[in-house]
Image (cartoon, helix red, strand yellow):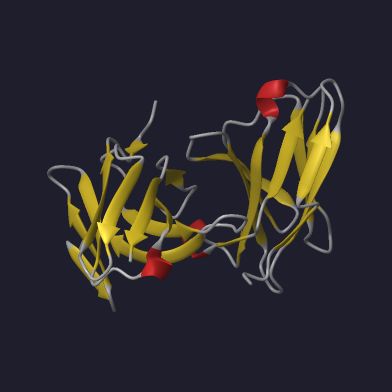
């Protein structure tokens, strides 16, 4: 039972344009959502998070949007840079307990 | 560098064998988490230890076991290995909450 889903395994975006990565979840008890970035041969690194009491959180070029009614969150990267090429995982938590991860989206930024 | 150290980085072993993966958490972190990432899968939570005691269990097989030692490092033991156990195994550590955890580089296990 995949409670967190990333339906796009890969995404290619031109440098300077906006990258939008999507994530859907099924468990309405999740109250905290995170995005991680992973380069090859490295562990996931925390990127940005959002609590379920908010619908938007911004950090520099990265913005996460949460639509609770649709059980959907998205990560926007503007403008996209070559260094953003990586695998992005969304994850969800309930009560600060274990993280449930999606399967990841491989983002490729085309120079 | 996240400050979480996992050894070894790579491990190749035969079916039926037993291996031990090691994790040294960041200084001061009391919680250690183990995750498994199989091909094209997300990270699957295996088990959490907090200050030496098991705190939460996920989809961990009975052939797998873990422990956290008094110096807070943790070991994940995988026995009677099968081809399907080939995966990346990540360790993460935090002071307390998983939402503040930092991940190690992972150990890539290949079972042949």
Q: Nearer the viewer, residue A57 or A11?
A: A11
Report the residue at 41% width, 45% height from top.
Answer: A104
Quarter-of-image position of residue A75 = bottom left
Q: Is residue B80 something that shows in the picture?
A: yes
Q: Residue B95: x, y in percent?
A: 60, 68
Report the residue at 32% width, 41% height from top: A6
User: Percent x, y for residue A89?
Assistant: 41, 50
Residue furthest left as drawn: A69
Where's the C terminus of chain A, which quadrant?
bottom left
Within the image, what quadrant is residue A60 found in?
A: bottom left
Residue occupying the far bottom of the picture: A60
Figure quadrant of the N terminus of chain A:
top left
Q: Is residue A91 visible?
A: no
Q: Is residue B25 rendered to the left or right of residue A69?
A: right
Which residue lies most toward the front here? A111
Measuring 68% from the left and 31% from the top, which residue is drawn there? B86
Q: In the rendered view, does B34 fall on the left or right side of B44?
A: right
Image x and y of residue B21, in percent: 79, 46
Q: Where is residue B18? Give x, y as percent.
A: 86, 30
Count of numbered tags: 0
A83 or B6: nearer the viewer? A83
- Answer left or right for A73 relative to B85: left
Report the front residue among B51 and A5.
A5
């Amino acid at each position: 039972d995949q409670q967190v889903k990333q339906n796009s395994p890969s995404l290619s975006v031109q440098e300077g344009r906006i990258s939008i990565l999507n994530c859907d979840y099924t468990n309405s008890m999740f109250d905290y959502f995170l995005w991680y970035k992973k380069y090859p041969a490295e562990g996931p690194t925390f990127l940005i998070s959002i609590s379920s009491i908010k619908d938007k959180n911004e950090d520099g070029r990265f913005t996460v949007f949460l639509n609770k009614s649709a059980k959907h969150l998205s990560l926007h990267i503007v403008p996209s840079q070559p260094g953003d090429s990586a695998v992005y995982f969304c994850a969800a938590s309930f009560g600060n307990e274990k993280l449930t991860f999606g399967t990841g989206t491989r983002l490729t930024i085309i120079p | 560098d996240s400050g979480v150290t996992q050894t070894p980085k790579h491990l190749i072993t035969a079916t039926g064998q037993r291996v031990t993966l090691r994790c040294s958490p960041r200084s001061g972190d009391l919680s250690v988490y183990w995750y498994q990432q199989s091909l094209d899968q997300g990270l699957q939570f295996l088990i959490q230890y907090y200050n030496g005691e098991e705190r939460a269990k996920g989809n961990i097989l009975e052939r797998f076991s873990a422990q956290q030692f008094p110096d807070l490092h943790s070991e994940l033991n995988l026995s009677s290995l099968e081809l399907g156990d080939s995966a990346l195994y990540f360790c993460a550590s935090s002071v307390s909450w998983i939402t503040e955890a930092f991940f190690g580089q992972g150990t890539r296990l290949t079972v042949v």
